[in-house]
Amino acid sequence: MRIIVHTGKGGVGKTSTSAATAVRCAEMGLKTIVLSTDTAHSLADSLDSEIGPEPVQMLDNLWAQEIDARYSLEKFWWRVQRYLMRIMAQQSNVEALIAEEITILPGLEEGAQLLWINQYVYENTYDVLIVDAAPTAETLRLLSLPESTRWWFDRIVRIMGGPGARLLRPFAKPLFGADLPEQEELDSIQGLFDTLDNVRQILTDPQMSTMRLVMTPEKMVIKETQRTFTYLNLYGYTTDAIVCNRVIPDLVTDPYFAAWKDRQRENIALIQEAFGELYMLQSPLFERDVTGYDDLRRLADALYGDQNPTAKFTTGIASHRIESDPDSEDYILVIPLPFARKDDLDVYRSADELTIRVGPYRRNIVLPHTLWKYEIGKANFADNTLRIRFIKPVSSAEEA
């Protein structure tokens, strides 16, 4: 299966791009599904058809889905929510409806969206999966969820499912005001988090999945897209193209647009300079909103021409890697962070984990066992790349 995720600032044409790409793939004979993870769905408007929380067939080889968070929670997370509701009922007299509302913990809705991706990859029903993602900030929270939830769950399960839990269980309610989860519930939660881990492996596999950054040739949009590219690299997701929409075409000669066209030319040059390694797809500013299949075909023609939308337009940009130093027994963790600033970076080490912060976002990287006993040496940031050296500790025998 080929997975393409379109993300970017709100209002830049992600949905139209996703729908046009899906229509082109379907008409090439590829069994395609396009799904929207944006809570403010507009995919149905773009396709000019009704879409539900389950896949709806639109054309030959084309299915569409607008993910409904509540529906998805009931489908995938009901065991987790059932336990949380039981805890609420034991600790207070809240009504069932209120308990159901307040047990929608941060991350549960996003997690349910990710589990659809896992289902489609596992079932292998489609050839292509196109994701019309939410605006940038929400998408970054969505893509970082597998790591953050695994970190949370591993610590909680040590308490609730560890060796002492069996002895503690009879005293849990008097001590904490609530029962510990039963083993069946822990197993179900474990299965969900294992699935989230699997989704992360799917979305960070450059042979299967790539991100595409959608933008318009406006300076503010370009800056936000640069930040998005940095954070996608931080979390290990591969970007293979940028999509520049709403470029005023040359056939527009009205003097009113002359200044706009000059500014767009300057900004497109800035995009090419800033994202030089990434392939750029362009589409013109159309004379009307892009809705319906005829308009989507026009957009696909403008974006791809005779190219296959499922091609990997840029290859070789790694998210992060570990290299051995040929001149020593050290290892070097290499993390490309395009557009990051040195004063925005922080690195922390805690036992088997490394935490990297770029601006408001952070990532916990679980180090391979080989590096657990290594000490962090010099961290160097140059050429948009962070290099962290891991130094082999000197043993007492070597010192002697």
Image: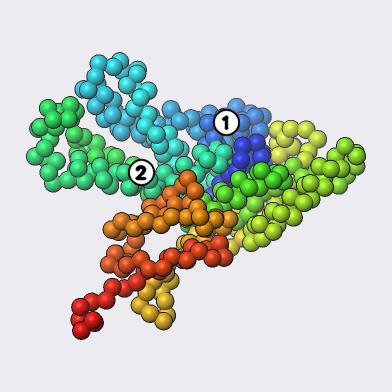
The answer to which of 59 and 317 lies nearer the viewer is: 317
Please provide percent x and percent y for residue 330. Answer: 37, 74
- Give the residue type that dot 2 points to: Thr
Taking the spot 26% from the left edge, 30% from the top edge, the residue there is 83
Mark 1 or 2, closer to the camera: 2
SS label for mark 2: helix
Farthest front residue in view: 343
Are there few (<14), some (14-19), or many (20+) residues within 10 Å of tag 1? many
Q: Give residue 186's quadrant in the image.
A: top left
Q: In the rendered view, would you say 393 is above or below 231?
A: below
Q: Residue at x 11, y 37 (%)?
A: 168
- 294 relative to 98, above or below: below
Name the foreground residue: 95 vs 301.
95
Residue 364 in view in this figure? yes
How busy is the neighbourhood of tag 2: few (under 14 within 10 Å), some, or many (20 plus)? some
Report which quarter residue 393 is drawn in. bottom left
Q: Nearer the viewer, residue 251 or 17?
A: 251
Residue at x 65% of width, y 29% of height: 45
| Numbered disc 1: secondary structure | loop
Q: Which residue: 52% across, 58% down?
A: 342
| Kind of residue sitting beneath label 1 | His
Of pointers 1 and 2, the one earlier in the residue sequence: 1
Residue 34, can we see it? no
- What residue did someone put label 1 on? 41
Q: Is residue 327 left or right of residue 162?
A: right
- Residue 380, label in figure: none
- Would residue 98 be found to the left or right of residue 292 on screen? left
- Residue 164, given in percent of the width and then of the height, sits at 12, 44
Image coordinates of residue 162 in percent, x first then y, are 17, 45
Assign the C terminus to one quadrant of the image.
Answer: bottom left
- Residue under circle 2? 149
